[in-house]
Amino acid sequence: MLDWIFDAIVWIVRLLMYGLLGTVIEKLFYWPGWAMLRLFTLGHYPPARGIPHNHFAVALFAAAVIASGLLMALT
């Protein structure tokens, strides 16, 4: 019974941490990602304001580009 309670607590904490990490990534990297994707796609993506698009995907693209650039520079 005690294991089930600990598993539930870990599951809840994991969900909260993933949500927090996703929010931090989206808030920090959305605008750099937006600028990079605008440059790389010649203005086609992300679309203009008001048209729905995936903000997290744009931010994750910037985070991946920045992380890979840092890894290449440091190795």
Image (cartoon, helix red, strand yellow):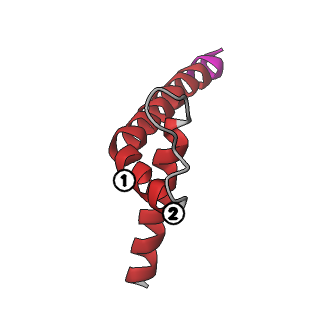
Which residue is pictured at 51% across the width and 54% down the height? Answer: 61
x, y percent for residue 3: 63, 23
Which residue is pictured at 51% across the width and 44% down the height? Answer: 46
Q: Which mark is residue 63?
A: none
Residue at mark 1:
32
x, y percent for residue 19: 48, 30
Label 2: few (<14), some (14–19) or many (≥20) C-alpha neighbours in 10 Å: few
In the image, residue 24 sits, relative to residue 3, either above or below, namely below
Task: Give the mark nearest the N terminus, 2 or 1.
Answer: 1
Name the kind of residue labelled 2 in the image: Phe
Question: How many marks can you see?
Answer: 2
Question: Overall secondary structure of the magenta stretch?
Answer: helix
- State the SS at label 1: helix
Q: CA distance from mark 2 to mark 1?
A: 12 Å
Q: Quadrant of the C terminus?
A: bottom left
x, y percent for residue 69: 43, 73
Q: Is residue 5 left or right of residue 17?
A: right
- Front-most of 55 and 38? 38
Residue at mark 2:
40
- Front-most of 50 and 54? 50
For residue 57, which quarter of the picture? top right
Do tag 2 and tag 1 residues touch (Cβ < 8 Å)?
no
Q: Which residues are magenta?
A: 1-6
Q: Is residue 27 magenta?
A: no
